[in-house]
Amino acid sequence: MNNEITKYNKQFWNKRGKNNSFFVAGSPMKKANPENKIVGKYRNRTEYKHLKNKINLNGKTLLDLGCGTGRLTFVFAKKCKKVVGVDFATEMIKQAKLYKNKNAAVNTEFYVSELQKYKTEEKFDIIYLGGVLMCINDTDVVEILNNIKNYLKPNGIVINRDTVSLTDRRKHAKEFHDRTDFTFYRTITEVKEIFNQKYETFYYSETYPIVIALNLYKRLPDKLRRNKIILFCLNFGLILQSAFFDKFLLNNKKLYKKVYNNWVKSDYPLRQFYFFHRLKQ
């Protein structure tokens, strides 16, 4: 990877690790605002539920590449026999190890490494890439995918969760939402093409659909958004959606076709997807 891009990405994610501004294993960190806590919990629930409805995690070994602080690593560990988390941000791994020690998560291990430099003799049932490949250029992604095929057990699968562009490829996340890390928002076709050099894609879908309560919440004036009753209603609405409606909405996008078309036409035509792959025979 370009050394300058690696430098800025590490600075960005290490800063996130130091200021505790995100979520660890479903538990909101101290400095997150109430809205982000609620939405973070929803994302944890719905991403995990979507995944476990598609694959069986019980007794499996899982390699979590780009694990951050273990937002999903520790959730996986509740079902998996063993989970290994790897991230290039030292401060992120420090947070993950603190959480591990505090909660006696003995079936988890964490290592600091750039993904293309990570080596292991272990074989895993599942390799999970959690929103990390979009921070890595195509050449290095191909190298990573060539490496990790050696870490898969027979019939093992690779799960890639990535934010993609619904139109054309977008570069550098600093163009979006004032972020300062560097990101490649590939199209769905581009993601599949990169994997299909060595793997076959057997399933792909958005991780979650339109979030109804959140969309209604964002239409409110700022003053109302801080109201405790409104925040309670937002949380309750997201709990209901993840429990009963996510799968239905994902399978019936025509119900929010207008909203979806507006996403496609927007300046930020980005959506989060799951891609499931296995090695070509």
Image (cartoon, grey):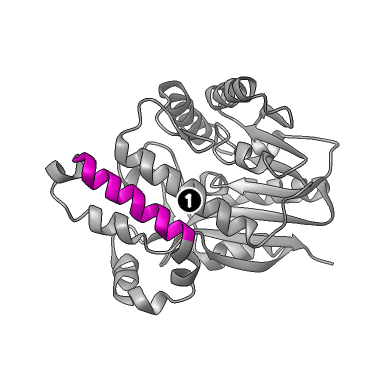
Q: Position of residue 263 (x, y in %)?
A: 32, 65
Q: Is residue 240 magenta?
A: yes
Secondary structure of the residue carrying numbered label 1: strand
Side (left or right) of 193 relative to 233:
right
Q: Amino acid at mark 1?
A: Phe
Q: Is residue 107 magenta?
A: no
The residue segment tinted magenta is 227-243
Q: Residue at x 41, y 58 (%)?
A: 240
Side (left or right) of 196 relative to 49:
right
Q: Position of residue 185 (x, y in %)?
A: 46, 54
| Along the line of sight, the residue nearer the viewer: 159 or 107 | 107
Q: Is residue 153 above or below residue 95?
A: below
Can the viewer see residue 271? no
Side (left or right) of 155 relative to 88:
right
Dominant secondary-structure state across the stretch colored magenta: helix
Mark 1, residues whose alpha carbon is within 10 Å: few (<14), some, or many (≥20)?
some
The residue that mark 1 highlights is 184
Q: Residue at x 59, y 39 (%)?
A: 1
